[in-house]
Image (spheres, rainbow, N blue to C red):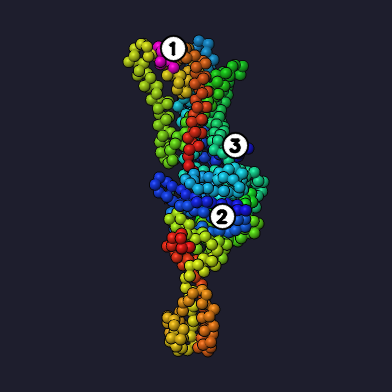
Amino acid sequence: MSIINVARIELLIARRNMWVATSVLMMAVFSLVLTLAGGAPTGSVGVSPLTVAATSITTLSVYLVPLVALLLSFDAISGEAERGTLALSLSYPLSRAEILIGKFLAHFLVLGFAVGVGLILSGLLVVWQTGNADMSFFPLIRLFATSLALGSAFLGLGYLVSSLVRQPGVASGAAIAIWLVAVVLYDLVLLGALVSDGGGVFTKTFFPWLLVANPADAFRLLNMPDVLVPELTSGISNAGLVSGFAGQLTSLLLWPVLALLLAWAAFRRVEP
Amino acid sequence: MSLLKLEKVTKQYGSLTTVNEVSFSLEAGQRVALLGHNGAGKTTLMRMMLGLTTITSGHIDILDTVPGDSQARRQTGYLPENVAFHGALTGREQLRHFARLKSVPVTMADDLLHRVGLNDAADRRIRTYSKGMRQRIGLAQALIGQPKLVLLDEPTSGLDPVSRHEFYEIVHELAGEGTAVLLSSHALSELETSTDRIIILSQGRLVANNDLASLRRNARLPVRLNVTATANTADQIAAELGGQRVNCSSVELTCQQDEKVALLGQITRLGEAVKDVNVIPVSLEELYRHYSKSTPEDQ
Ligand SMILES: Nc1ncnc2c1ncn2[C@@H]1O[C@H](COP(=O)(O)OP(=O)(O)OP(=O)(O)O)[C@@H](O)[C@H]1O
Ligand SMILES: [Mg+2]
């Protein structure tokens, strides 16, 4: 019951948060624009236009979803500790786990709304463009579910940072750093290693697993059928084959759980 | 049976001892003021009672359980010293949230908004509230769910004189219903008439813990009497009673509490020469200064 109450008040705050409204709008606009842009070469080799749209949106979501998740979560603990409301909340019959889960629930719903609105609009656009509603919506559903898993992982990481760092200013810096490392630098380093290795042991044995260990890359691999990624190095599509669907799914589902558990462990040690 | 009992409670931050072997207890219906200089350890003490920070040594018994226990938290109200509620919420939303957390009907939140005089502003965003209005939200939430014990850390800061008066009326009502109230404050004058007991901390040590009358008696600070003369008799009165002439028509005398009645008798016997007498009791402020300088042994 307390979880629901925490989630309720968080949703109320999110509803009036300019930044949340901006994220929803941003996700919707980008999804629509990418669907429109991706719609041009349809008819090629029998690929469903929805698959094309989902693939385009994936390339963007892999950056945006973690960003939105971190921005929703970095202030959750440190901000409340700073404002004194954490001390007050903890003087109520309310456990830390309930606070964390309640906040997570609210932020998960916000994320689901932001991603969902964009994807529904994209789906409608494709149906309208092709004049055909009789197609498989699986790529969009898969993209929605995996976006939520990816977002949850970064929500958890955001709470972790927020618990470890007292000042909200530092927490926001740390959150941006996590985003940069996880969705930008990690891939660059791996690609660099791949190039210098030149198809050696690293490429064959370690690289596929290192790639899938990053939830952002697992998300990318899950949502991009190999036929559609000629622009990616053959190394990456091979990697997708080695780790396989199970490996990618495991990574994407394990990360949220792990990140939330770590966040809880760190939150337990926060003195309000 | 005490609602709150502290035994030799000590708090250390590294090598800094901020609360040092403090013991006292609080009974139902008592209004107790916790006084002390900045950094004396008042806030730290309250945070320990609530389980918000650990106790280095000693023991706290709160509502028959340990600090932080959810049973104790359900029956405790707390107003932190510094709290900034989320500006995007309205006063009513914020207070109803707290009512839900304590599992009491949300209508109770509405009643409390009324009680702290926020009825008109209840549906405005807290962002638009004045400092005193925010303080009242804090007060209102501390009263939710008819707590048995209320801990208020500087509750009157930011309140205007009328609101302060209203606040002490609320405290009086609470005590009447059997709630124990512990409040810290730096505004001493208003506490004299509105508390049953005063606890003074100095450098983390408890230096006084008694009702005002006993504190006055034990401190043995002189009572001041101000005698106004009728005509040009001030010098004569000063000579007769052994006082100090302060201006052309009045004389100031000092005596111990137990000599006061005798001295008044002496003054009355001067008859016509005396126009008026004012007895100025030892103020809480003087007592506070006296006890703050003392060590725990001579309380
Ligand atoms: N988290 C902390 N880490 C280190 N020292 C602390 C911490 N919190 C409080 N202190 C120290 O403990 C002492 C008591 O602080 P406390 O806040 O209890 O004082 P106070 O009596 O409430 O003062 P004020 O009237 O200014 O509110 C101070 O010396 C303060 O510096
Ligand atoms: Mg204080």
**Mark 3 crowd level (few <14, some 14–19, many ≥20, 10 Å Cα):** many
Q: Earlier in the sequence, mark 1 or mark 3?
A: 3
Q: Amino acid at mark 3?
A: Ile
Q: Secondary structure at mark 3?
A: helix
Q: Circle 1 — which element?
A: helix
Which portion, as a residue range, is magenta? A204-209
Q: Amino acid at mark 1?
A: Asn
Assign a secondary structure to mark 2. Answer: strand
**Label 2 amino acid?**
Ser
Q: Which residue is mark 1?
A: A238
Residue at the location (40% across, 27% down)? A181
The correct choice, above or below, for B297 with respect to B224 in the image is: above
Reading the image, the residue beneath label 2 is B25
Name the spot of residue A79 as percent of width and height, x first: 47, 41
The chain holding disc 1 is A
Chain identifier of the residue bearing label 3 in the image = A
The residue that label 3 is drawn on is A3
Q: Nearer the viewer, residue A83 or B293?
A: B293
* Gap between marks 3 and 2 measured at Cα: 35 Å
